[in-house]
Image (cartoon, rainbow, N blue to C red):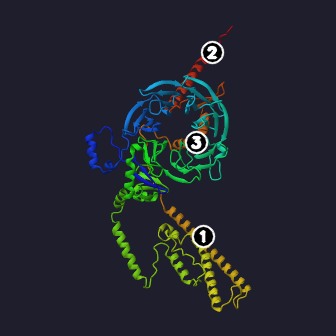
Amino acid sequence: MQVSNVNDVKIYNLSCGKSLPEWLSDRKKRALQKKDVDVRRRIELIQDFDMPTVSTNLKVSNDGQYILATGTYKPRIRCYDTYQLSLKFERCLDAEVVKFDVLSDDYSKIVFLQCDRYVEFHSQHGRYFRLRIPKFGRDFSYHYPSCDLYFVGASSEVYRLNLEQGRYLNSLQTDASENNCCDVNRVHHLFATGTAEGKVECWDPRTRNRVGLLDCALGSLTADTEVDGLPSVSALKFNGALHMAVGTSTGQVLLYDLRSSRPLIVKDHNYGLPIKSIQFHDNLELILSADSRIIKMWNTNTGKVFTSIEPEHDVNDVCLYPNSGMLLTANEAPKMNIYYIPALGPAPRWCSFLDNLTEELEENPESTVYDDYKFVTRKDLENLGLAHLIGSPMLKAYMHGFFIDIRLYHKVKAMVNPFAYEDYRREKIRQKIEETRAQRVQIKKLPKVNKELALKLYEEEDERPVQKKKQKSMPSILSDDRFKVMFENPDFQVDDQSEEFRLLNPLVSKINEKRKKKLKVLEEQETRGEDDEEEPEGKPSDAESSETSDEEKGWVEEVRKQRKLIREEKKVKRQERIKEDQQTTLKPKFFEIKAGEEFRSFQDAAKKQNLIKKTLEDRLKVEEKLGTLNVSDTAVGSKQLTFTLKKSEQQKKRQEDEKKHQEERRKLRRSAGHLKSKPQKGRAFF
């Protein structure tokens, strides 16, 4: 059992502790209880009060004997008998349950609204009847006088199913695009539905007419609240004849008096998460509002927080056991939590022994939730090497850090720094020795980095005049932690030979001289008792202006000299480089040719490299000039490219030789034909 104290209110988590697996035998369970202290001390109030994966909804029967819970996976319902403190029965369903309600005093009549638009009616033996609604449902309420079930969901209509006649009646037409939740007042049976537009519509079941409209979206906007987007109504609950609480999707709870359109109190959870459940505690005038992260209990009149509960896992539903201080929660985890808060009321009759246990714990106070934990920041975790545990159950996030088990913290700290005690002892001895040496003459040690700068700062501190008590002493750079690295890290060493330093050094030295002169003048004025406004004797203002002009001229000349020296040094360096280049002799380099390739010339390799560097467009242009590429426009409008393979030099030589042979043959043929066609002498042709 875990005990926490929030706002001076004791909260007992009865479901905290190790859970034993079901497949263990009774003999092994008993052996574990003997060995493990945590298993022995745990309180199993109701046996097997959990789900395989996630629990979604919780209800208590009207007679208070049975607790019903739904969960996944697989979709199922479990009924627990409080008189036997154990599981009574379990039924598996075809689809996940969105909402369910108990119509009878015990578990004999149950209605389930499922996520696949089916509505199931169960009796003692199991499923009795099953039907569908036209649209996906989100919530429903039972109107006892007329035996009507009102279903709201992803539609503007409110569907009415009469259980006496066994048929649908005319639906109620609302002005909303979708309806998220609904509730029926048990005193005057007013039906109210919460819309996605942030409004609450109230209907009279007797006349089937709308009798009121509340705009909760405007009511949730106050000076202290910040709302992102349009707040829709996510939870709705009546209390008595006149009061109604409305929860929004942006994390606000509005308490209304039905006689007024303005909310009495607007309570913000400050998490920006939709409100999932609202419960009323009439004895203490409290409202229990819950989102997925926190359960807040606050006063209905003042809005002051009574206490709050932050479970380890996200909350899906909250059920307050009637007329007691017990709170049941359905979480995004297999285990369903049971909280007992004595300040809310006594324990139920079936677990009255809890009052005796809590009284004994108060008489013998034990460690609370945070006594066995150590608060560490993210930087501490990185130093200990435990940053990989962020997000795991070993760390519990709280404010700007985390809570870690004190035993784990001490173990890790001992492993990281096993000589911590010896270091602590040495540090204490060193401090005592320094205290004894405080009366001696202290010699200022110069740092390893920037010794000249440190010496200069020490001299300036010694030359400073003694300041008056009213004047605040300015901190020195040496004692300031922000500039500590400048005298430790060698990367911050001032380079005396750099151009920037040599050009700025004359200016810095002149400023230091001016500062020293001013300090001397101030000391003289203080000794003589003269005012600061009067001029010192023997030095009129004209003489001072002439001195400053002379100093500026001298500074300009020094800067010019430094620039000339820098230029001369650069020229000398260039000449040295040129001499080194002239003296160096280039040696020939040898290159190997890949196997299967012939060496032609360096020009071909250079051409290939140039072609590789060029873009695709330039390469295509070159190939067009060589005739290896043809670009033609098609009728559709796109372009067509045709490539021809380049021929090798041997093929080119062969083609050239063949062309030469063909030309020689043609010449021979022409010469032979010319000789035949010539006429012989002495013959005539007719």
Estimate how packed mark 1 is, as few (under 14), some (14 to 19) or many (20 or more) residues with alpha carbons within 10 Å.
Answer: few
Q: Look at 43% across and 85% down and name the residue there.
A: 439
Disc 2 or disc 1, which is closer to the eye?
A: 1
Estimate how packed mark 3 is, as few (under 14), some (14 to 19) or many (20 or more) residues with alpha carbons within 10 Å.
Answer: few
Which of the 4 image quadrants contains residue 554?
Answer: bottom right
Q: Tell me the element at label 2.
A: helix
Asked if one can make out residue 591 in the rendered structure from this viewpoint, the answer is no
> Closest to the observer: 272 or 566?
272
Residue 204 placed where, x, y %? Answer: 64, 33
Q: Tell me the element at label 3.
A: loop
Q: Which mark is residue 677?
A: 2
Residue 354 placed where, x, y %? Answer: 39, 49
Q: Residue 240 carries which label?
A: 3
Which quarter of the figure is the C terminus placed in?
top right
Q: Tell me the element at label 1.
A: helix
Tell me how far mark 3 sits from mark 1, CA to CA.
95 Å
Residue 294 vs residue 404: left or right? right
Residue 430 placed where, x, y %? Answer: 38, 76
Tell me how far mark 2 sits from mark 1, CA to CA.
93 Å
> Closest to the observer: 18 or 434?
18
Q: Which mark is residue 567?
A: 1
Q: Is residue 205 above or below residue 262?
A: above
Q: Is residue 318 above or below residue 101?
A: below
- Amino acid type of disc 1? Arg
Residue 536 placed where, x, y %? Answer: 69, 89
Tell me how far mark 3 sits from mark 2, CA to CA.
136 Å
> Do the residues under discs 2 and 1 have CB atoms within 8 angstroms?
no
- Amino acid type of disc 2? Ser
